[in-house]
Amino acid sequence: MSGKTGNRIQHSAGRGPRRFQRHAERVPPMDLLTQWFAREGLETAPFVTWERVNLKDFLQRTSHIALPPEERLRHLAILAEPIASSTTQPRGWALLERMYDTAARWDSHNPWIEHSRAISAMACADGDVSTATRAAILESGRIALARALSMVPEDGLLLSTMSQLEYADHQTEAALEWADRALAVEPGRPWASLIRAHCLSDLKQWADAAAAYDAVPQDAFQGPGSWRMALLVEQMGWCRLKAGDTDGARAAFEQIVYRYSANVKLARTAMSRLVVRAAKRHFPELAPEVRAIAQALGWQWAQDMLEP
């Protein structure tokens, strides 16, 4: 990080004209921290630059921002997460652990440090990672969430995140238990609802899984993650089909094929083999439309699957 840039920001915030100080005080602390990150160029910095970040120096140079040290460190780790999770593991995870460990030394009773640590662990474990390394990283996340839950035992977000982590670790029954606990505390919690449905599907409890997918709140995932709501319709349709509800399955697949036809960009992000398989084996009347979507996307594999 550039010392000149950091000193300039600190000087302006602490010893500049009184008019500027009054203006700066109106800026929310998180916005100030985000601006500091941007001026340092950290959002686009290579991983080797991140590895050279001196955390003591970081805290000193952001001391003018009215956020506790542990919170500044937590957000530093969150900012580093994308590049740390995309680099070789466990090298990337070691960087984030160093940040979270330092944050926890400032406040060992902060459950949200551990919650963020667990989310980062899932991000680092989701990629081209050896089985042993992946297991070790996820175990670190599991331990972090256990610490958080020891502080706030009945928090729906923490319970839901534990269900996500267990599902990421292919612990289906454990993930289902945590999802049920989360939903008992906070009905309709989005990720817990979705993980519960995934688990029931994996356990081949088809009717219950279809009902669970149907129970996921319609506004559960918005913005960049909204594609999950489209994929959910496919998964619900497939579970209905396996449960013997042919009419319900047809309705679900007709609905999603219509949406994909109207929005090919959504199809590129969300459409899975379930739609192609359903059109091929069970609902041939949908095959021409699915083939047209595949052609628009340039998906030869889907066109091949639909061949007689």
Image: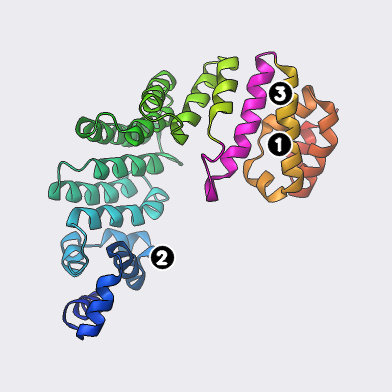
Left/right placement of residue 170 relative to residue 137 reads right
Front position among marks 2 and 3: 3
- The residue indicated by pointer 1 is 256
- CA separation in Å, label 1 and label 3: 11 Å
Q: Residue furthest bottom?
A: 17
Is 146 left or right of 227, judged from the image as shown? Answer: left
Quadrant into which the C terminus falls: top right
In percent of the image, x 13 and y 50: which residue is there?
Answer: 106
Residue 44 marker: 2
Q: Position of residue 138 (x, y in %)?
A: 34, 34
Judged by depth in the image, the label closer to the viewer, 1 or 2, is: 1
Q: In percent of the image, x 24 and y 72: which residue is there?
A: 25
Residue 307 in sight in this render:
no
Q: Is residue 98 above or below residue 140?
A: below
Residue at image point 25% right, 46% down: 97
**Where residue 150 appears, x then y in whole percent?**
20, 30
58, 115: nearer the viewer: 115
For the magenta stretch, what is the residue range?
A: 218-244
Q: Quadrant of residue 248?
A: top right
User: Please, what is the three-letter code of the amino acid marked with disc 3?
Assistant: Ala
Residue annotated with mark 3? 249
Separation of residues labelled 2 and 3 (CA atoms): 45 Å
Q: Would you say residue 227 sits in the magenta stretch?
A: yes
Q: Secondary structure at mark 2?
A: helix
- Circle 1 sits in a helix, a strand or a loop, which is it? helix
In the image, what residue type sits under mark 2?
Thr
Answer with mark 2 or mark 3, whichever residue precedes in sequence.
2
Work out whether mark 1 precedes mark 3 in sequence or the reverse, and give the earlier one: 3
Viewer can see residue 26: yes
